[in-house]
Image: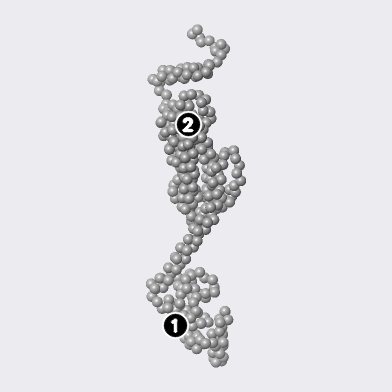
Amino acid sequence: MEDMEDDSLDTKDDHNHNCCASSSSKVRTYLRSQLSGVATVPQPACPLVPGGEPGTRRGKLWSGSTGGSKFMDSDSGSESSEVSETDCTAPPAAVEGKFTLESTSKFLLNAMAVEDYRKNHWPNLEKAIDRLLIQNPTDHISVSYAQIYSYVYKCVCQQHSELLYNDLIVKLTNHLQQVSTHLQASPPEDFIENFNVALTQYTASLQCIVPVFMYLNKFYIESKLNRDLREDLMKLFADCVAEIHLSTLMPLLIKAHSMPFQVQPSTMASVVKGLYSLRPDWAKLAPALFSGFIPQINPPAVESLLPDYAAHDQKLQMDLSMNGFPRGDQSRKRASEDS
């Protein structure tokens, strides 16, 4: 009976049909030693792989729930590092040195993910941003906002938030530098109108850009940078456009404010309110100008200055009257009790 078992060992092959007859004597010796001392002899650190000699076949090392290492067949699909018999007999420090392959693989996977971001995700996002930046407020450009949001979602999930945020800032900075250059060439009589167009167009674009980057804003800008995406992008306009041209824009606004209807009232209101929203401190440069469009800019009225307020109102009425704005028919005005 024992001879039959020995013969069966000589002809048994592994699950890949690799014949093991050439190593039957070694297998028989190993199995007998294991069966005879199964109750007293502990498991070896790296058990022998069935179907071959130790060290002749390589398998996959898999960490089990008990904290030990089990030796699995290479066809099982495990994604751990390969070890040989020399790894089993080597000191623990030498074995741990093999696991640097895992960190290397993670680095390669991350490099592949960055390459995919550079080749696929960002180019598609950049094209969509270009179309949103050049549109007019009344235009309707066909842009798939769901697709843009999907790209942003994937970038954040693949831990490219910082890379995506930096690319977005650089993209809009370059755009605003072109806007600033265009304003530099504007004639003085058209400067206020052109500035208003640039500010209005940029603000309208942000109404589309900020929502599709909502996932980036929530999980990176707000949580890690403690800022807001819209505030950051509006600050870009203040730094790259408004502050550069403020020395040219402010005297033109003061002059236009002193000459009613030289510039459309809606344009004046849009520019002044826009400047105040960008930098409230700019109101201190021309309090009379900003107080005409922004409520509560001036300090509270003081009783001792009431005569000055009345004199200012009378002067304003005289200026309007001299510039062709009559006070109207006063015949139907109720007579004063003193008359």
Callouts 2 and 1 close, C-beta under 8 Å:
no
The quarter of the image holding the N terminus is: bottom right
Q: Position of residue 49 (x, y in %)?
A: 50, 79
- What residue is drawn where x is 52% and y is 45%? 210
Query: Between 286 and 91, which is closer to the camera in this rendering?
Result: 286
Query: Between 336 and 68, which is closer to the camera in this rendering?
Result: 336
| 283 relative position to 131: left or right | left
Q: Residues within 10 Å of mark 1 (few under 14, many from 20)?
A: few
Image height of 297 relative to 153, above or below: above
**Labels 2 and 1: the sequence-earlier one:** 1
* Residue that mark 1 sits on: 40
Query: Between 125 and 157, which is closer to the camera in this rendering?
Result: 125
Q: Position of residue 19 (x, y in %)?
A: 56, 84
Q: Residues within 10 Å of mark 2 (few under 14, many from 20)?
A: few
* Residue that mark 2 sits on: 188
Image height of 232 relative to 307, above or below: below
Instruction: Please give the count of numbered marks on the rendered protein.
Output: 2
Is residue 119 something one can see in this rendering?
yes
Q: Position of residue 220 (x, y in %)?
A: 47, 50
In front: mark 2 or mark 1?
2
Is residue 219 something one can see in this rendering?
no
- What residue is drawn where x is 52% and y is 31%? 267
Disc 2 and disc 1: Cα gap in Å?
98 Å
Q: Secondary structure at mark 2?
A: helix
- What residue is drawn where x is 48% and y is 27%? 256
Image height of 121 relative to 256, above or below: below
In this picture the colour scheme is: one colour
- What residue is drawn where x is 41% and y is 17%? 307
What's the residue type where badge 1 is placed? Thr
What's the residue type where badge 2 is placed? Pro
Q: Secondary structure at mark 1?
A: loop
